[in-house]
Amino acid sequence: EPEVTQTPSHQVTQMGQEVILRCVPISNHLYFYWYRQILGQKVEFLVSFYNNEISEKSEIFDDQFSVERPDGSNFTLKIRSTKLEDSAMYFCASSEEAGVSYEQYFGPGTRLTVT
Amino acid sequence: SQQGEEDPQALSIQEGENATMNCSYKTSINNLQWYRQNSGRGLVHLILIRSNEREKHSGRLRVTLDTSKKSSSLLITASRAADTASYFCATSRWRNEKLTFGTGTRLTIIP
């Protein structure tokens, strides 16, 4: 069964460093999302991406964050200058075009630890 | 309460019993999705119910949706130890829109 994959599974970085989190969505999906979950808290939406552009972003997704689909398979989240409060589990998700099936399927997550 | 709030926050039952979790939300929705999360792991999609549906089944799972009360319930029948996890509901206002998650119910199945 197709699934969303994410790398790395765990990333440790120092405050102020740049990190890139990578995701490979399900191949026939057209909508892509990033969410995060701070330990013990609810899952929060960061950004959605469709047709090679951001379709919606949350207040969390400030200028330090960016997303890119550099090729036909990868979807990346970049944090330019990490802060301690960026420590969280980051999830990528994808869904098909509406009208067919629009369940959002999530990857296993990348645990980001900022020290 | 916030959009997508589950109750109870925690539930412990004996293996073999049924588990019921509830979710309430505030705004109009297009669909509601339930997810399972094992400790520290990813979110596993369980079931999606559309706003024009009232009930849906998948294996041992039964989901109901009452749009007049803005609430949904997830029933797991004949629970197993492997069902121990956190369960989240998530809503979206239209198809393919971002999901707004609830706070989750932590379910513990006692063998």
Image: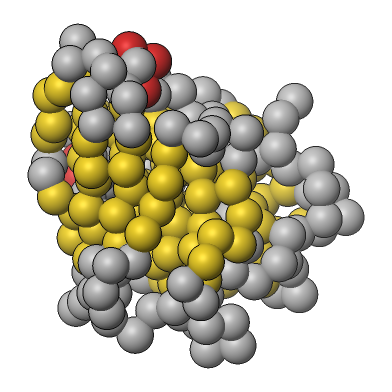
Residue A95 placement (x, y as % from top left) = 44, 72
The answer to whether residue B45 shows anywhere in this view is no
Relative to A29, does residue A48 appear above or below in the rendering? Answer: above
Please state if B7 lies on the left or on the right of A10 as rendered. Answer: right
**Where is B35 relative to A96, above or below?**
above
The C terminus of chain A sits in image quarter: top left
Residue at 40%, 53% in the rendered image = A67
Q: Quadrant of residue B4?
A: top right
Residue at (76, 75) in percent of width and height: B52
Q: Report the side of A59 relative to A103 (left or right).
A: right
In-image side of A81 versus B91 (left or right): left
Between residue B5 and residue A112, name the one nearer to us. Answer: A112
Q: Where residue A93 sits: x, y (%)?
A: 38, 59
Q: Is residue A29 left or right of residue B54?
A: left
- Residue A3 seen by the camera: yes
B82 or A22, which lies in front?
A: A22
Picture mark count = 0
| Residue at figure coordinates x 75%, y 25% from the top left | B1
- Note whether A13 is above or below A107 in the view shown: above
Nearest the eye: A28 or B54: A28
Instruction: Examine the image and state in which quarter residue B7 appears.
Output: top right
Picture coordinates of residue A44 (x, y %)? 51, 37
